[in-house]
Image: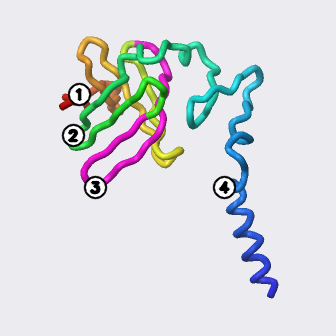
């Protein structure tokens, strides 16, 4: 009987995050941060987050081999190929050259770091040796 009670106690504790309202999870934990409706993190705490909607050069449709990524101006993104589809959020990490971005898929299931090459209009990855290589190009909209 103790094992059954322990099982239900563990099960209810594991389900607890799903029972908490989303509003409670969006409260700022950074002093001076103000919550805003941006999806996953929901906070604007950096001057980098204050770009005008749609003005970031990474916004648009990108082709990564057989996968299409759609990065929206509101910070949301979606990727898909014939047998897979998932959503997430993106944010700018640094505005250097190339600019660095972080894409968070399915609430943290996977996080990709990508770079935007300004003169080439390409998305790049950074190799271990520090060199950048092109990994995506703008997708043609039909």
Q: Which residue is mark 3?
A: 83
Q: Is residue 55 magenta?
A: no
Pick the front one: 90 or 135: 90
Tag nearer the camera, 3 or 2: 3
Q: Secondary structure at mark 3?
A: loop
Q: Which residue is mark 4?
A: 18
Which mark sits nearer the N-terminus, 2 or 4? 4
Q: Position of residue 41 (x, y in %)?
A: 60, 34
Q: Which residue is mark 2?
A: 65
Q: Residues within 10 Å of mark 4 (few under 14, many from 20)?
A: few
Q: CA distance from mark 4 to mark 3?
A: 28 Å
Q: Which residue is found at the position 55% from the left and 18% from the top?
A: 49
Report the span colored magenta: 77-96
Q: Position of residue 54 (x, y in %)?
A: 42, 17
Q: Secondary structure at mark 4?
A: helix
Q: CA distance from mark 1 to mark 2?
A: 9 Å
Q: CA distance from mark 4 to mark 1?
A: 38 Å
Q: Which residue is mark 1?
A: 137
Which mark sits nearer the N-terminus, 3 or 2? 2
Which mark sits nearer the N-terminus, 4 or 1? 4
- Decide: is 56 above or below 141: above
Q: Secondary structure at mark 2?
A: loop
Q: CA distance from mark 2 to mark 4?
A: 36 Å
Q: Position of residue 81 (x, y in %)?
A: 27, 47
Q: Which is the main secondary structure of the residues drawn in magenta?
A: strand
Does the CB distance between marks 4 and 3 fall below 8 Å?
no
Instruction: Give me the disc on residue 23.
Output: none
Quadrant of the rendered structure where residue 65 is?
top left
């Amino acid at each position: 009987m103790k094992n059954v009670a322990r099982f239900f106690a563990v099960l209810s504790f594991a389900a607890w995050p799903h029972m908490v309202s989303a509003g409670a999870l969006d409260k700022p934990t950074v002093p001076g941060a103000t919550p805003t409706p941006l999806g996953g993190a929901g906070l604007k705490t950096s001057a980098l987050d204050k770009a005008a909607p749609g003005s970031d050069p990474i916004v648009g449709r990108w082709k990564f081999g057989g996968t299409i990524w759609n990065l929206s101006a509101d910070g949301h993104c979606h990727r898909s190929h014939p047998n897979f589809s998932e959503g997430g959020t993106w944010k700018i990490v640094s505005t250097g050259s190339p600019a660095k971005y972080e894409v968070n898929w399915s609430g943290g299931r996977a996080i990709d770091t990508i770079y935007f090459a300004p003169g080439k209009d390409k998305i790049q990855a950074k190799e271990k040796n520090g060199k950048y290589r092109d990994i995506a190009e703008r997708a043609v909209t039909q």
